[in-house]
Image: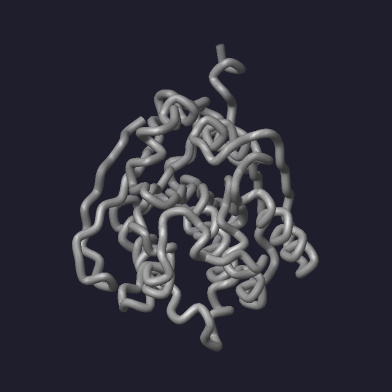
Amino acid sequence: MAFLDIEYNSKILGMERRVSVIYPDASEIDPDQVDDQDIPVLYLLHGMGGNENSWQKRTNIERLLRHTNLIVVMPSTDLAWYTNTAYGLDYYDALASELPEVLHRFFPNMSRKREKNFIAGLSMGGYGAYKIALKTNRFSYAASFSGALGLGIDGTDLDAIPGGSRAYWEGVFGDLKAPGVEQHFLTTMVAESDKKTKFYAWCGEQDFLYQANQVVVQKLQELGLSLEYQHSPGKHEWYYWEKQLEYILEWLPIGYQPEERLS
């Protein structure tokens, strides 16, 4: 496979941006799985403190994908929560709308079909994956690992989440007490969804986000989302997220085969 580090100019953000892409090598794939004209794509999102290189640095993602005909796109939102921020940088638009079009210029054989477009993320990226899937109706599968899904929904004070002060949160989302802040809640975004996406969420039982996941997952299911939820012993750590990555590769309709099954 090829690992590409692409720098491009984002017109929406008004700055140079970088995105990492894993591109499959047909010589390593079962010939029956090769389709060079319409390759499935997984957008894989990072958490707070991460960037476009986090998944490649922290997991064995290249080994996991070695025999899989799948393009993996790993963008960066900095610390902006995949959101059009109150401070004027529209990260959501840049990632949800602009980036796919940029990438189709590089990879015209990257599928545009909903059934072959997937999105997943960890922590902040879990929130981002659900947000983009709900608002665009462009993905057939969306997954969250230890996701910050309860943002504002479960009564959690954002000041209590590690990594940000009130000034930081209001820079991203605006006045947390003002009318309209609900637009950033996943339960509000369900109204924009056609509810055709299949969702998956996992959270470790020792994770500081576990209780919030319990609350929000139930609310999203009650609102009609097709959402599979799993929890098991685990913390907010890469050890567990790598295991979940392998799980969703098997969950996605891409004919994934772990290496041990091919030996």
At 25% from the left edge and 66% from the top edge, which residue is drawn?
Answer: 10
Q: Using residue 114 as the reference point, say whether residue 13 is left or right of it.
A: left
Q: Quadrant of residue 213?
A: bottom right
Residue 110, percent from left and from top: 42, 51
**Foreground of the two, 51 or 38:** 51
**Foreground of the two, 156 or 216:** 156
Quadrant housing the C terminus: top right
Total number of numbered labels? Answer: 0
**Foreground of the two, 65 or 83:** 83
Q: Quadrant of residue 88?
A: bottom left
Q: Quadrant of residue 83?
A: bottom left
At 55% from the left edge and 88% from the top edge, which residue is drawn?
Answer: 179
Residue 34, percent from left and from top: 49, 34
Residue 78, percent from left and from top: 33, 57
Q: Is residue 96 visible?
A: no
Q: Is residue 52 visible?
A: yes
**Foreground of the two, 87 or 250:** 87
Q: Using residue 22 as the reference point, say whether residue 182 is left or right of it.
A: right
Residue farthest to the top, as pictured = 263
Quadrant housing the N terminus: top left
* Relative to 234, residue 181 above or below: below
* Relative to 30, residue 196 above or below: below
